[in-house]
Image: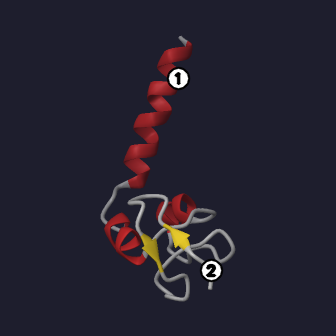
Amino acid sequence: MKHYTCNICGEEFDYRDPQCSTTDRPCCAPGELGVAASGEDVCPRCLRVGRSVDFRAAMMDAWRRAVDKTL
């Protein structure tokens, strides 16, 4: 049996759960959450919590900070 550890919380999870994301079976979540979780091992609990994160705002803030550092 494969063992997966969540890249967010560090807990081991069952990769067979359809509500998780693994590197070999990327997340099917829409929008920015899908982009952020795809290619990562993310447990179902962290994926549920991720649905409440405003990834667009977080990305824009990070992008602005990166641009400010180059000025």
- Give the residue at x 48% y 68%: 42
Residues 14 and 40: in front is 14
Disc 2: which residue? 2
Q: Residues within 10 Å of mark 1 (few under 14, many from 20)?
A: few
**Is residue 26 shown above or below 70?**
below
For this orientation, the residue located farthest to the top is: 71
Q: Amino acid at mark 2?
A: Lys
- Give the residue at x 41% y 53%: 55
Q: Is residue 3 left or right of residue 55?
A: right
Number of the front mark, 2 or 1: 2
Mark 1 residue element: helix
Tell me which label, 2 or 1, sits earlier in the chain: 2
The x, y position of residue 60, in whole percent, is: 44, 40
The x, y position of residue 6, in whole percent, is: 47, 65
The x, y position of residue 53, in whole percent, is: 33, 58
**Is residue 42 shown above or below 60?**
below
Mark 2 residue element: loop
- The quadrant of the picture occupied by the N terminus is bottom right
Disc 1: which residue? 67
Say if mark 2 contacts mark 1, CB within 8 Å: no
Separation of residues labelled 2 and 1 (CA atoms) = 41 Å
Q: Amino acid at mark 1?
A: Val
- Give the residue at x 50% y 16%: 69
- Give the residue at x 55% y 72%: 4
Q: Is residue 45 left or right of residue 3?
A: left
Q: Which mark is residue 49?
A: none
Q: Residues within 10 Å of mark 2 (few under 14, many from 20)?
A: few
Residues 65 and 6: in front is 6
Q: State which quadrant residue 45 falls in.
A: bottom left
